[in-house]
Amino acid sequence: MPDSMTEQLQQDMECEGLLECFHGLKQLDKECFQALVNADEPLTVDEVAEAVDRERSTAYRAVQRLLQTGFIQKEQINYDQGGYYHVYRPTDPSKIADEMQRMLNDWYAKMGQLIGEFEQKYEDRSETPPQAQS
């Protein structure tokens, strides 16, 4: 990931890059998300791990990061004889897009405020004449 905004704007970014850009998700997180998107039905962590060819514990951590960011949802399935397990599925893309748009708007407002503060701080200094030395 590029360090500066200039580098980011010059880079050819694909829509999946938003996962990294907005939430700092890792390559494995994106692979797990893609596995869930490609699945015909919700998947267990074991099934996600198999789809991305990783250990269950590694896939579980990626699934937890995706849950925390709201990119996927968890559902509990109950066994008839007792007990349960969880399955995961992607969140509706329009909800994800709305949340990313909200975050972008918040970021834009914050950057605008900081730019205004920068301008005010340094404009005040540039208008002050240097003091004469005696």
Image (cartoon, rainbow, N blue to C red):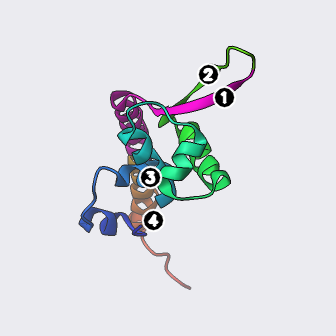
Residue under pointer 2: 77
The first of marks 2 and 3 along the sequence is 3
Residue 76 found in image quarter = top right
The first of marks 4 and 3 along the sequence is 3
User: Which residue is nearer to you in this view: 128 or 68?
Assistant: 68
Which quadrant is the C terminus positioned in? bottom right
Residue 24 pos. (x, y %) = 50, 54
Q: Are marks 2 and 4 in contact (CB under 8 Å)?
A: no
Give, as a single range, the part of the protein colored magenta: 83-110
Q: Which mark is residue 30?
A: 3
The first of marks 1 and 3 along the sequence is 3
Q: Which mark is residue 85?
A: 1
Identify the residue shown where x is 35% and y is 63%: 5
Identify the residue shown where x is 36% and y is 55%: 17
Identify the residue shown where x is 35% and y is 35%: 97
Which quadrant is the N terminus positioned in? bottom left
Estimate the spatial distance between the alpha carbons at disc 1 and disc 3, rounded to whole Å.
23 Å
Residue under pointer 4: 125
Q: Are marks 2 and 1 in contact (CB under 8 Å)?
A: yes
Residue 25 pos. (x, y %) = 50, 53
Residue type, label 2 = Ile
